[in-house]
Image: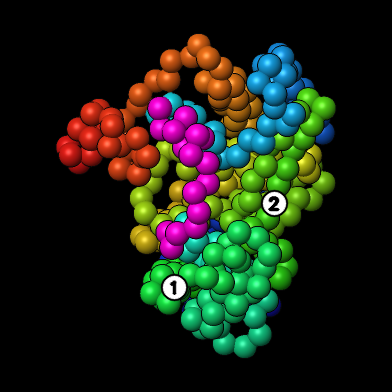
Amino acid sequence: MALLDDTLNPAQRELLGVLGAARDERPTFPDDVRARLRDELEDGLRPLVPLLDTLGIDDLWVSKHRLSSVTGCEVRFLAEEAAGFDGWTVPRARGSVAHRAIELSMNWRGEVAPGDLVDEALARLTESDNSLGSWLQTVGEGDRADLRSAAVDRVAAFLELWPPLAPKWRPRCESRVVAELVDERVVLAGKVDLTIGTADGMRAGKVLVDLKTGGFSPSHLDDLRFYALVETIKLGVPPRRVATHYLDTGTLVPEDVTEGTLFAAVRRVTESVRRWLELRGPHATPVLKPGPVCRWCPQLASCPTGKAHVDGD
């Protein structure tokens, strides 16, 4: 159903203006773009297979988080790899709860209330048989209240900033994308917060959106280029545009997808995976790169450079 402009607030109208495009404004890509991207990826990754064998890795799963981490501070990256996932916390869980609530809002009949959506999301996630469900079943009431409050704030911001997503736009939340490469030895995988639209033949139409709280980071753009690459390998048609939407400020940072951005993502993947495997070996020296994430680094207490950076903020 078409929406009249006077039903939308200025932020919603602006968002539609940035993300929307008439059919003749959407780019068309060549039929062989997927094959060329895959070939270049596999040409870069295949020489690393002996390293996988040496390290005893049957299949290497590559996510946006690992790519971002290995291109940042290598000392922090290795510390996090060694520690592994050490359990759920309110900050870690709020995104999953909010995204589930946003997904429910797309098919919710009647008036949408952020608190109702979050309560339903919490109930469904608590019943799940994964690690988040187990944590939610045992979490204390104080943490649960904090989690609900944080998720409600995030969902309310989304509903204020986004227009109702019409079914014809084919909105999807937490859309999983996977690309298996080099005989399934390297797997690129991720979940896109929100996708809108669809391709028409080789004419691009899909928009990939990452929802963020907090401020801008250059790595956010790299994350979306990674998603665009995996989407293209999966579907054969690149998305039309990617965008990071910062819910705290309402700022939208878009980028049109081109062959140039996709091949840049290929180079980043192959170079980052190569360095990742080198760091797993016995002879590499990790490079220290202080930055905003130092305050959350597990090595902070024993890192003078990191402590100096945090103290200087």
Please tell me which residue lies in front, 181 or 250.
Answer: 181
Looking at the picture, how far across and down is residue 244, in whole percent? 49, 50
Q: Is residue 147 above or below residue 270?
A: below
State the mark number for residue 123.
Answer: none
Looking at the picture, how far across and down is residue 74, in whole percent? 43, 26
Q: Is residue 152 left or right of residue 208?
A: left
- Could you tell me which quadrant the C terminus lies in? top left
- Per the image, label 2 sits on a secondary structure element best described as strand
Extent of the magenta region: 75-91
Q: Is residue 99 above or below residue 86?
A: below
Residue occupying image coordinates x 67% and y 42%:
189
Instruction: Work out whether residue 275 can be spotted.
Output: no
- Per the image, label 1 sits on a secondary structure element best described as loop
Q: Is residue 253 above or below residue 127?
A: above
Closer mark to the observer between disc 2 and disc 1: 1
Return the residue at label 2. Answer: 176
Residue occupying image coordinates x 56% and y 40%:
64
